[in-house]
Amino acid sequence: MTGEKITLLIADDHTILRQGLRRIFEAEPDMSVVGEAATGTDAVKRARQLKPDVVIMDISMPEQDGIESLRQIVKTLSSRVLILTVHTEHHVISEAVSAGAAGYLTKDSLDHELVSAVRTVVHGGTVFSPNISKRLAESSQAVQGNGYRSLESLTSREREVFLLLAEGKSPSEVATSLFVSPKTVHTHRQHIMEKLALKTTTELIRFALRQGVIKTL
């Protein structure tokens, strides 16, 4: 986090929505909106200039969609990206999670839910609207009966790695948090994926949602 206040960049192509979000966040004593962007490419440019703690990102954006902008931002910056959109299609949610979204909220979220979500992601957490969590979790219900798909099968260290990965942290960030090498994290991740019968980080987050270890609003 930069300074005493949580700094935010709002990226949405609707001026009235950006203005509304600005009013919501700036009414909070610990938050400051440092910039706005109306296109996907401008969102990436502004994020690189301002280095905000959190970027509020829509998916349907001119010039470049929000998921590609999200991907470019998290690749080079420590900013956390919180998706705020009308899209609830499963493939869109999965793509955003895979790209590195720290959270995914729908635009019918209440003011206090948005504020709470920002505080959650800025401290390393992951947060989803209830209907988004439901959609992600549903996709893996069919394999819930697999005996290997239990956190009980993980060692204490593997569980620590699992929880950090579920929060959206990269393997290098996990390594830093646990004071181990990236190679060690990679080995733990491999064992976790094998034990839980998972193939991708998106599947890992879905599993974490079903286990109740990721926050929903």
Image (spheres, rainbow, N blue to C red):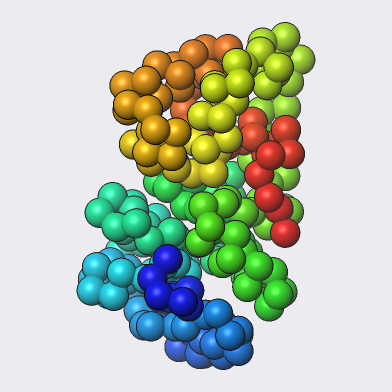
Image point (51%, 52%), residue name: 124
Task: Give coordinates of residue 67: x percent, y percent.
Answer: 39, 55
Tell me the quadrant of the picture where the C terminus can be found: bottom right
Residue 89 appears anywhere in the view = yes
Image point (31%, 69%), residue name: 51
Task: Give coordinates of residue 184: x percent, y percent.
Answer: 37, 20
Q: Is residue 44 above or below residue 89?
A: below
Q: Is residue 147 left or right of residue 69?
A: right
Nearest the camera: 58 or 60?
58
Q: Is residue 138 above or below residue 20?
A: above
Image point (45%, 19%), residue name: 188
Task: Give coordinates of residue 139: x percent, y percent.
Answer: 65, 33
Tell me the quadrant of the picture where the N terminus can be found: bottom left
Q: Is residue 72 above or below residue 56?
A: above
Residue 198 appears anywhere in the view = no
Q: Residue furthest right?
A: 145
